[in-house]
Amino acid sequence: MQTKRDSLISLILEKIAIGTLRPGDPVPSRNQLARKYNISYVTVDKALRYLTDSGHLTAVRGSGTFVAPPKTASWSPVNRIYSIFHSFSYFNLNLGSVIQNDLDFPVVFNNIDDTDSSLYFPEFLRAGAGVVWYYPFISRIYLMDMLKRAGVPMLLLNRDYGDFDCIMTDAHASLREGISWLLEEGGRNFALIYARQGTAAPYRASRIIAAYENLADFGISLSPENVYPMTHLYDPEELSSVAYRIFLQKKMPKCIVLLDSEIAVSLITIGMTMGKKPGEDYFLLTFDNDPQLAQFRGVGMLEQMLSLFCMEAKKFFFSNSIDRSKPFRKYIKAELIFGGRNA
C-alpha cells in the first residue's frame, strides 16, 4: 500500500506524464496541496523535496516550485521492476536472478501481461519503479512516451523505437558472421527469404536491411528469382511455392538466408521431399535458435544472446557509470551455432 507521500509523488508524476503539468508550469504551494488532498504540510514537503531532488521539479527561491525541463531529470533509485511480456512470449530471460545477483539490497520483480500494461500506469509512476518492455507493440509507444516524460527508468528489449532506451540484437554484425560462413561452405549463389515488413514485427526491417547490406559488402548479387519476400509467413501454400521455386531451379542456390526461423523446419522438410538435403545440396542460415533445427547438418542459427541482455539491463538500472544524459543503446551480436553436430 502506498504511503500518502508516495501517492502525492505518483499523482504529480502522472500529471507531468499526461501533460497536465508541463515544463515551466508552477506546482501548487505546499499549503494548497495539503488542503486539496487532505494531507499534512510535512507530507507534502517530503513529496516535493523528493521530486526536486530527483530532478522532476525545480525550486526557485521567492517564486515557488516548477516542473523541470525533461533534460534536467536525474535517475531515481530503483527497487521495483515491472517486466511487461506478451502472453505468447518465447523469451526466457532470467532477468530477476541476474539483476539481484551481487546487489546489496532487495529488488521486487513483477511480471505483467502486455494487455494489462495500461492498468498499471499509476504503479509505474511510484517512486523506485522501473519498467522493462519485452518487444513491445508499436501501439504501446503512447504509454511509453508518457512514462519517459515522467522520468520513469524504462528499457525496451529487442525494439528500437525513436529515442527510447533499448537493448537490441545487432542484426548487421550477426548476419555478417553468418553470411561469411555460408560463403565458405556453399559459394556465392545465394537466395534470400523473408517476411515483408509490418507493424507487428518491426524488427524485420533491420534484418532485411542488414541482409542486403552484408550481401552487397561481400559482392554478392542476388538475381530477382532468388529473392522471396513472403506476404503471409505462415501460409503453407505460399511457403510451398517458395520452396519449389528454390529447390527445383536448374542451378539451385547453395546458400539460403532465411530471416525468420519459424518456417525453417517446414522449408527443409519440403526440400527433403524433393531430394534436397541441407549440408549436402545447400546450406541454410536463419535467425534464432530453433531446437528442431539441431538435427540438421548444414544449418546455421543466429542465437540471440539473452543472457547478455540481462547483464546490460542490470547496468542500465544500477550502474553509476551510465551517462544518463544520452539515450542508452546496446547492440549485441548473436552467436552463430550449428545443427547436426552430434548427428
Image: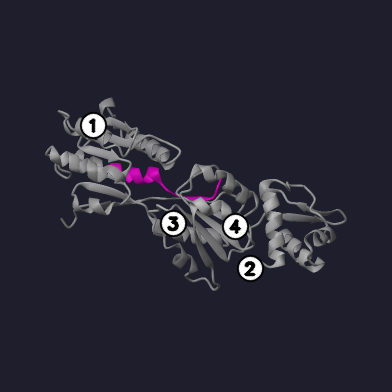
- Mark 1 in CB contact with mark 2 (< 8 angstroms): no
Of mark 3 and mark 1, the one earlier in the sequence is: 1
Rendering quarter of residue 182: top left
Q: CA distance from mark 3 to mark 1?
A: 37 Å
| Residue density around tag 2, few if under 14, some if 14–19, many if 20 or more, within 10 Å | few
User: Where does the magenta region start and end?
Assistant: 163-180
Q: What secondary structure is found at the residue carrying circle 4?
A: helix
Q: Position of residue 66 (x, y in %)?
A: 78, 52
| Residue positioned 23% across, 38% down in the render | 255
Where, by quadrant of the figure, is residue 279 drawn?
Answer: top left
- Residue on which the image places disc 4: 124
Q: Pointer 1: what residue?
A: 241
Q: Is residue 118 above or below residue 103?
A: above
- CA distance separating discs 4 and 2: 14 Å
**Which residue is located at x 19 percent, y 53 percent?**
295
Q: Is residue 170 magenta?
A: yes
Q: Give the amino acid type for the residue marked by disc 3 in the picture.
A: Phe
Question: Which label lies toward us, 2 or 3?
Answer: 2
Mark 1 Cα-neighbour bin, 10 Å: few <14, some 14–19, many ≥20: few
Marks 2 and 3 close (CB-CB < 8 Å): no
Residue type, label 1: Ser
Identify the secondary structure beneath mark 1.
helix
Q: Which mark is residue 309?
A: 3
- Amino acid type at circle 2 is Met
